[in-house]
Amino acid sequence: MALGRSSVPARGLTAALASFAVLAVAQGCATNNRGFDPVDAAPRDASAVDAARDAASPDARPGTCSPPTTLADLATTTSFGLAAPFGQNVCTTSGVRAFYSACLGSNASSSGCTAWRNANASCSSCLLTPRGSTRVGPFHTDSSQPPSNENPASLVADWSRAIVATCVNGFAAGCGEPALDLDSCLGRACAPAGNCAGEPPTVVAACRERAGEASFACRAPLLTREAACPGVFGPRDGGARGGETCFPTANEDLATPSGAEGYLTRLALVFCGP
């Protein structure tokens, strides 16, 4: 989902987040309706792909949504930095929503965003931190990108990945990047726009589960993530869940403005709310 190095149009917010929408749908079958990690949440039986397909769509063509054994050119995510502390208690829900409206939403503008930042200095300094800082908040800014009506908050081009990686790093330093790499692999292995086109969420989730098993394409990224993230993503790590908080839930449709606003408001409050 890397967006390149150019500025990110604020009015293209939902497009920048849209590739997470498939993820949210795929994880909707998890019992707790949360978390990006079907590898932990879905059934571990390798036959789950066929069973889920038969249950959801008996007439579906068998074998259309199965993970490959290899994938070329798997991404290795660069560092997004350590996360600033969670729960800084400098922003309210209404304040974060006002930030979204002024700086990210469809009516965002350079003048409106600047006015909001000037009037809400403490909240703004928590939400918007320069990329490359020792510790960064949910939104990373780039001083080389002056505010404009297309990018009022001067966000860096890869901010939609950065917000996830930074948040996950708040649960375990160095965990966010391997988590993104695994998710990228699972998305390619069971692509709803590719080999899993037209399949229901249960089938896609089962495919993603199988992709992390031995002999399939995402086994190595899974092992790397588990080594970097003990106790962050699920019972198999022997700890309480936490990192799922950083990914969209099943009811946050990131292809819609309201879904994107809900997700980003929730994540912003993890860092900067009470």
Image (cartoon, rainbow, N blue to C red):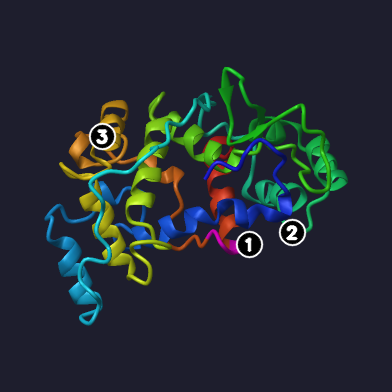
Q: Amino acid at mark 2?
A: Ser
Q: Is residue 118 left or right of residue 213?
A: right
x%, y% of residue 74?
A: 38, 38
Q: Residue furthest top?
A: 134
Q: Is residue 178 above or below residue 95?
A: above
Foreground mark, 1 or 3, reads 3
Q: Identify the mark at residue 257; answer none if there is no mark.
A: 1
x%, y% of residue 73?
A: 40, 37
Q: Residue at x 20, y 71 (%)?
A: 62
Foreground mark, 3 or 2, reads 3
Foreground of the two, 49 or 10? 49
Q: Residue at x 49, y 27 (%)?
A: 78
Q: Which residues are magenta?
A: 254-258
Q: Quadrant of residue 76?
A: top left
Q: Are marks 1 and 2 in contact (CB under 8 Å)?
A: yes
Label 3 Cα neighbours within 10 Å, binned few <14 / some 14-19 / many ≥20 = some
Q: Residue furthest right?
A: 111
Q: Residue furthest front?
A: 72
Q: Amino acid at mark 3?
A: Ala
Residue corresponding to mark 3: 220
Q: Is residue 60 above or below residue 112?
A: below
